[in-house]
Amino acid sequence: MSPMHRVLIPGGGVGGTLTANLLARRLRRRIDRGEVEVVVVDAAGAHVYQPGFMYIAMGGERAERLQKPERALLDSRVRLVIGSVSRVDEVARIVHLEDGAALPYDQLVLATGSRIVPEEIEHFATEAHHFYTADAALRLRRALDAFTGGRIVVGIAGMPYKCPPAPLEVAFLIEAELRERGLREGSEVHFCSPIGRAFTIESVSEMATPILEQKGIELHTFFNVEGIDPARKVVLSLEGEELPYDLLVLVPPHKGAQFLIDSGLAPAPGGWLPTDRHTLRVGGRPNVYALGDATDLPLSKAGSTAHFEAPVVVEGLVAALEGRTPSGKHASYEGRVMCFFEVGDGKGTLLRFDYDHPPKPPKPNQLWHLGKIVFNKTYFHTVPKGRV
Amino acid sequence: MLATASATGTIARTIDARGSYCPGPLMELIRGIRESQVGDVLAVLSSDRGSKIDIPKWVDKAGHRLVALENLDGYDRIVVEKAR
């Protein structure tokens, strides 16, 4: 009997969970015969629906509804190990955990996501709000509740970051809320973009810019956050501008997992894995894949990206196990991403694109807003289990 | 007309952002500028068609100096001096 083939997946987010479940479905007989083992390693053992955080701040969402035990979402054939990865030994093909455990692998799928590093901006913790954790989103909600008028600045303190539309969505939603509460006349809303337009993708920028104008949200381009002066209540840009604020909302800087840098898999300081845009293999290695936020691909860091990448990773893993080249409709990843985009006042639009086809967002309407709400409510029953 | 690369003096650092897409090359340049001293000259290589428009605009806004912009074989070479 040949030795057991081990597929190890650090990361229990969208990418890791879906990859494990799709793999377990395709290899169920081999797993049952003890020829293959699929292992997910997750630090918390909990699966969090991160896009919901924004709705804690803006839409009455509750943190407890955004989290499920990872075990409950995984196929029963997948083994779950709860622990934090400290290092990958590529020579020995072993992943070491902080608790001393050593997990051997034949194929490795890095689904380690991204992490926020607000501490890289001095005074961020005391001056800036964000919506990238449940607690931070709740603090932003409370700050908005206490807001009675003044200057609100929404900006981006580092690229790349999770869910590219989110800061624009928050600016739109805050502006709509101020109108509903009768605070709009006594308030200004400013949106700061690090690049020369409102959004990275040109067609989306062309859709969003007139909405910013219509809502009276002032757009500041080429505003790369360099620091915060808490005494004067101003946010400073690398380009030499200053913007005063009464309420500051900033997307914090993001990085990849530290152990990827420490193991020589990803370059410092960002820690994004050098990933082939079609095969999703890391740095030319035949047995290491990456998906989701962890890659350096020029795509949205969003669950949707991982969702569409997972079947390609699975086909690559199965093909390697069977000694053939990947084939069929998931042989290659073509950059497919799909995400909803809120514009406020109960309206939204849809961004659907791939490497070769930029999005052509439809005119915002109530349907796409409702689509996002339905997706948020049904997520745990659909995406991680591979039902959509 | 901008100076050619040969007239730009010493390049302190070349950032090869070929294969990276908007805003990758600009973000790489911004990181390079943050890590450089005033007077340093940086070269960015970019195959993204938007870079030759976006990067000069950013350089102007940020108060640095565009030293050269060259169209080479399938990519652009943009040379910038950190001015402040």
Image (spheres, coloured by chain):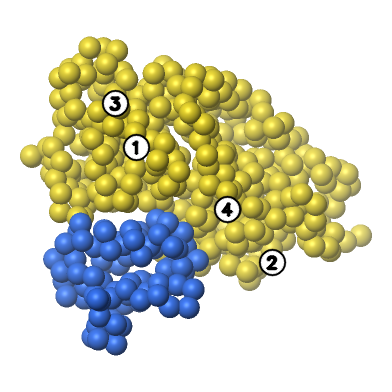
Chain colours: A yellow, B blue
Mark closest to the chain's N terminus, 2 or 1: 1
Looking at the image, which is closer to me, A94 or A180? A180
Q: Residue A209 carries which label?
A: 1
Residue density around tag 3, few if under 14, some if 14–19, many if 20 or more, within 10 Å: some
Tell me if A348 is positioned left or right of B58 in this view: right
Pointer 3: what residue? A215
| Type of the residue with mark 1 | Thr
Q: Is residue A187 above or below residue A313?
A: above
Callout 4 and callout 1 share a chain = yes
Q: Which numbered disc, 1 or 3, marks the residue that appears first in the sequence?
A: 1
Label 2 resides on the chain identified as: A
Q: In which quarter of the image is residue A72?
A: top right
Report the chain holding disc 1.
Answer: A
Cα–Cα span, label 2 and label 4? 23 Å
Q: Would you name the residue on which mark 4 appears?
A: A355
Chain letter of the residue beneath label 3 in the structure image:
A
Q: Earlier in the sequence, mark 3 or mark 2?
A: 3
Image coordinates of residue A234 in percent, x first then y, are 13, 41
Residue at point 42%, 56% (across, down):
B22
Mark 2 in CB contact with mark 4 (< 8 angstroms): no
Question: Toward the viewer: A186 or A36?
Answer: A186
